[in-house]
């Protein structure tokens, strides 16, 4: 399964979106590591899944559990991000460096729960969040070979695939101050 995922990740074609790109080359298309968001009742809360991407991250094993995603290097585990739970993780090179970022759907909170998107640029050691707690919820999916982010009015849970929302492309961009930011860019008609 791992070899198939690695092959699929490297074989996918380019991602098209509506953001103006400031990248040297078009990133490869998205791949699914795991996705429990659509079938959340199938998620095992006690399960752990591991993934290796030796061409991009030699010597690193990524581990998913319901509450976090971590990286294991030389037997040492470091938490990359957490959620309540982390529903899904997609692999997509958002910055054109040739290495996929870990793009996740996660719930967060107690009582007041929001849905947010987390992007871990493991190569740069950076974590980005797309959230608007109490106002908007964000989820990821793959549609027609593109990683799509959908924004819905809060609260969007339980997630209704037929609910109205605004869809766009997830992008890591650089603002005028030179800071990398995660944003949703709208789809053009």
Image (cartoon, grey):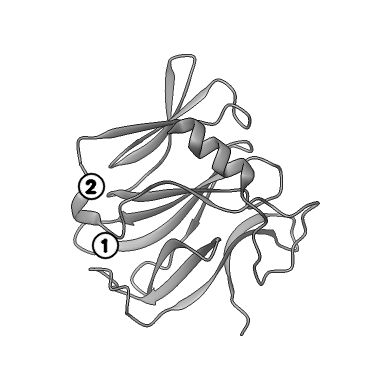
Circle 2 sits in a helix, a strand or a loop, which is it?
loop
Distance of label 2 from label 1 (alpha carbons):
18 Å
Going from N to C along the chain, the mark reached first, 2 or 1, is 2
**Which residue matches tag 2?**
43
Q: Is residue 65 above or below residue 186?
A: above
Disc 2 crowd rating (10 Å Cα; few below 14, some 14-19, many 20+) is few
Q: Is residue 73 above or below residue 83?
A: above
Residue appearing at x 64%, y 40% in the figure = 99
Q: Are marks 2 and 1 in contact (CB under 8 Å)?
A: no
Residue 40, image x, y percentages: 24, 55
Residue appearing at x 33%, y 71% in the figure = 134
| Residue at the far bottom in the pictured view | 189
Q: Is residue 94 visible?
A: yes
**Which residue matches tag 1?**
113
Quadrant where the N terminus is found in the figure: top left
Q: Is residue 100 visible?
A: no
Q: Determine the image quadrant of residue 171.
A: bottom right
Q: In the image, 175: left or right of 151?
A: right
Name the residue nearer the viewer: 2 or 55: 2
Quadrant where the C terminus is found in the figure: bottom right
Residue 34, image x, y percentages: 38, 46
Q: Is residue 85 above or below residue 70?
A: below
Residue appearing at x 44%, y 57% in the figure = 117
Disc 1 crowd rating (10 Å Cα; few below 14, some 14-19, many 20+) is some
Q: In the image, 112: left or right of 53?
A: left
Q: Nearer the viewer, mark 2 or mark 1?
A: 2
Q: Determine the image quadrant of residue 98.
A: top right
Residue 35, image x, y percentages: 36, 51
Rendered image: mark on residue 164: none
Residue appearing at x 20%, y 42% in the figure = 44
């Amino acid at each position: 399964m791992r070899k198939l995922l690695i092959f699929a990740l490297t074989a996918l074609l380019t991602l098209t979106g509506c953001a103006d790109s400031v990248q040297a080359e078009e990133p490869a298309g998205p791949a699914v590591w795991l996705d429990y968001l659509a079938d959340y009742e199938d998620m095992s809360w006690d399960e752990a899944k591991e993934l290796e991407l030796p061409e991009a991250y030699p010597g690193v094993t990524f581990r998913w559990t319901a509450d976090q995603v971590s990286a294991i290097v030389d037997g040492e585990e470091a938490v990359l991000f957490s959620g309540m739970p982390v529903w899904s993780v997609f692999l997509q090179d958002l910055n054109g460096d040739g290495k996929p970022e870990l793009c996740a759907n996660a719930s967060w909170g107690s009582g007041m729960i929001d849905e947010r998107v987390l992007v871990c640029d493991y190569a740069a050691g950076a974590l980005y969040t797309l959230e608007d707690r109490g106002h908007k919820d964000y989820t990821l999916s793959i549609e027609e070979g593109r990683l799509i982010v959908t924004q819905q009015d809060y609260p969007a849970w339980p997630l209704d695939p037929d609910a109205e929302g605004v869809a766009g492309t997830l992008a890591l961009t650089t603002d005028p101050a030179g800071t990398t930011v995660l944003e949703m860019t709208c789809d053009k008609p």
